[in-house]
Image: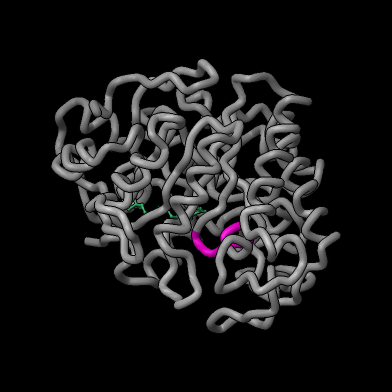
Amino acid sequence: MNAFEPITLNNGVRLKNRLVMAPMTTYSGNPDGTVSDEEIAYYKERSGGVSAVITAVAYVSEHGKGFLGQFSAHEDRYIDSLRRLAKTIQSGGAKAILQIFHAGRQSPANEVPEVVGATDITSDGQPTPRALTTEEVQQIVRDFHEATRRAIEAGFDGVEIHGANTYLLQQFFSGFTNKRTDVYGEDRMKFILEVVQAVQQAKEKYANDAFIVGYRFSPEEPEEDGITMDQTLELVDVLADQPLNYLHVSQMQFDSEPRRYSGKATTRVEALQETIAGRLPLIAVGSIYSKKDLENASHIGADLLAIGRELLIEPHWVEKIQRGEQVETALDTKNPPVLPTTMFEIIKSRPGWVPMK
Ligand SMILES: Cc1cc2nc3c(=O)[nH]c(=O)nc-3n(C[C@H](O)[C@H](O)[C@H](O)COP(=O)(O)O)c2cc1C
């Protein structure tokens, strides 16, 4: 794959290259849930080189908030704020894709009226969630539909359903966190497929085929009852036949290897591509910092690559790589690039997360 070659999605939308900005939470929205000026400046700086920006995740339900300073998509009063974000990204030349989720049991207790989850299984340092009733699950499906409508009204080019990183969609798919006895426990893919359908229905009703819908997932969990690579391949096999435009695997290292897997592929991306078999494009991600990393990642068999932390370090990374210029691969904390204040503080407080000078 040549990272600078365009790609046309199955809905006819052409992306100018194979590089997209990975979704990254900024912790820097306004206290009322709107997008802040600092976030606008941050996105403006990074929307020139990549073909699409997948935004920080926005929440779809009041009890689905996952972070301090997260911007919202859960009520119509946020449409103007979201429109500002979409316009900023598009004015740089990139497609604007709003990532949407419900945090489920990962919600901080002081950010939501009540912490809810698939089951009342707690996670480290978190309060015990209340298991959602069947009716509440169905309401969250409708919340995803409504958030998609808002993204469309706000002028976004698409949405990415965030089914990764241990948030609610993943909590329903995982045997570790889903011990339900209702229909959503009997079939752990049911919630995911209903959300995909609800998003698609919003697209059909309020947008046209050019609106992009992607799905992000995490390939494996470490817990005994958690998601295995084999289970993810079963899910991906079903997702590849859904009305989606791309799949996006969430990883920290682009060439990571499967752990609990019965097949022969050496990397997770290879295993995923064997199953997807060309039905949808796959975005891979994880630790692409240098030109050499990009060359190596170009050979793993993914259709697109997402760049996260390196775009924090080098906002014009794509343009610089294309021009053959040198790039920094560690964050200059003394002379930092444009970053929202709280995001910068949180990154500095967690050594090892983002490489720092
Ligand atoms: C500051 C920060 C915030 C993140 N927030 C999100 C998020 O909102 N949604 C998501 O799916 N992944 C999120 N991630 C994960 C990234 O999308 C990406 O998968 C990960 O950082 C590995 O890619 P990288 O090595 O290019 O950074 C975040 C990562 C970072 C560093």
Residue 216 coordinates in the image, percent (x, y): 50, 47
Quadrant of image for the C terminus: bottom left
Is residue 334 visible in the rendered image? The answer is no
Using residue 123 as the reference point, say whether residue 21 is left or right of it.
left
Using residue 261 as the reference point, say whether residue 83 is left or right of it.
right
Residue 172 coordinates in the image, percent (x, y): 63, 62
What residue is shown at x 40% (from left), y 46% (from top)? 338
What residue is shown at x 65% (from left), y 41% (from top)? 196
Residue 300 coordinates in the image, percent (x, y): 23, 41
Asked where in the image residue 154 lies, by quadrant, the reply is: top right
Q: Nearer the viewer, residue 261 or 64?
A: 261
What residue is shown at x 34% (from left), y 32% (from top)? 303
Residue 355 coordinates in the image, percent (x, y): 26, 60
Relative to 9, say whether 19 is above or below: below
Q: Quadrant of ligand 1?
A: bottom left
Image coloring type: one colour
Membership of 169 in magenta stretch: yes
Relative to 119, say whether 330 is above or below: above
Using residue 147 as the reference point, say whether residue 167 is left or right of it.
left
Task: Name the residue furthest front.
Answer: 262
Relative to 116, say whether 332 is above or below: above
What residue is shown at x 54% (from left), y 43% (from top)? 238
Image label count: 0
Membership of 205 in magenta stretch: no
Q: Which residues are magenta?
A: 165-170
Is residue 45 visible in the rendered image? The answer is yes
Using residue 316 as the reference point, say whether residue 245 is left or right of it.
right
Q: Nearer the viewer, residue 253 or 41?
A: 253
Quadrant of image for the N terminus: top left
